[in-house]
Amino acid sequence: MYQKQIEQLVVLQTVDDEIKILEGEVREAPLELTGLEAKVAVLRERQAQVQERLDILKGQQKRLEGEIEDDGHKIKKSKNKLMAVGNSKEYHAMMREMDSMEKLNRLREEERIAVMEELERQDSAMAEVVTEIEGFMEGYDAKKATLDERIGKAQGRLDALIKRRTKAGKVVPPPILGRYEFIRSRIEHPVIVPVSEGICGGCHIKIPPQAFNELQKGKQILGCPNCQRIVYWVEHSPHILD
């Protein structure tokens, strides 16, 4: 019975070690996407900023085109009125007004051209950021699919290991199992180690002769007096290490 308990404790430890690795993978795997998500978030913010500038520029363009068109109508009306002016004073006054409107119109036209040029630059910036986002999203989707598959496999393996752990735990008496759990929560792996030639496989310190003699009898689960790990004599279960 002693040997069976030791064997099941070793099985339990092996299962627990794999469970710990798999739980870490299931927990940490999604974090691999965090970097891509952060980059996409930055790009989305850039996209929103470019779109905001585009909206403002389009508004300016529409306003300028409307003002230029209105001024064109006013200049045309003024030219028609100019033909009907009866004296030179009115003529010169209207000419000054027309010159002022034409000058203002030229300035608006220059502003409109500048706005159009800036629109082209912002359109290029938008196309660039959209392409970059699409590239990142392709990588994100591919990586997510891979991670989902990895997590699914890890979770399936975890479920099987937990069942195996439960089965192994049933063979070990509750006090010993509780002792195993207590030690595992407080010391560095491994918890159950072989003793070979009187040396503990955990702390690598020689077991006191009396304790070693008790261990060789194989009648009860014992711990290393130095590191407190559960120990077993390697000669009792040589195949455990295979």
Image (spheres, rainbow, N blue to C red):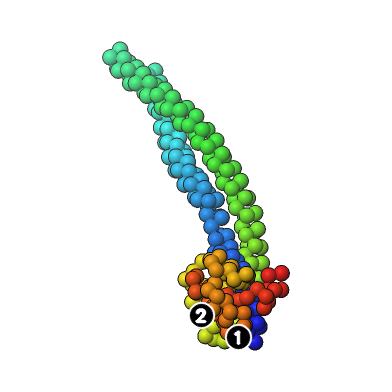
> Nearest the camera: 132 or 130?
132
The picture places residue 227, in percent across and down from the top left corner, at 50, 70
Location of residue 73 with respect to 198 vertically, above or below: above
| Residue found at x 66% / y 83% | 4
- Marks 2 and 1, Cα distance to the nearest angstrom? 17 Å
Dot 2, crowdedness within 10 Å: few (<14), some or many (≥20)? some
2 or 1: mark nearer the eye: 1
Q: Secondary structure at mark 2?
A: helix
Location of residue 81 with respect to 234 vertically, above or below: above
> Nearest the camera: 63 or 32?
32
- Quadrant (top left/top right/bottom left/bottom right) for the N terminus: bottom right
Q: How many marks?
A: 2
What's the residue type where badge 1 is placed? Lys
What's the residue type where badge 2 is placed? Arg
Q: Is residue 87 visible?
A: no
The picture places residue 89, in percent across and down from the top left corner, at 28, 14
> Nearest the camera: 66 or 82?
66
- In the picture, measured across the screen, residue 116 lies left or right of residue 26, that is left
Disc 1 designates what residue?
A: 219
| Residue found at x 60% / y 53% | 140
Q: Is residue 34 visible?
A: yes
> Nearest the camera: 28 or 18?
18
| Residue found at x 46% / y 31% | 115
The picture places residue 119, in percent across and down from the top left corner, at 49, 34
For marks 2 and 1, the one nearer the N-term is 2
Q: Residue 179: which disc? A: 2
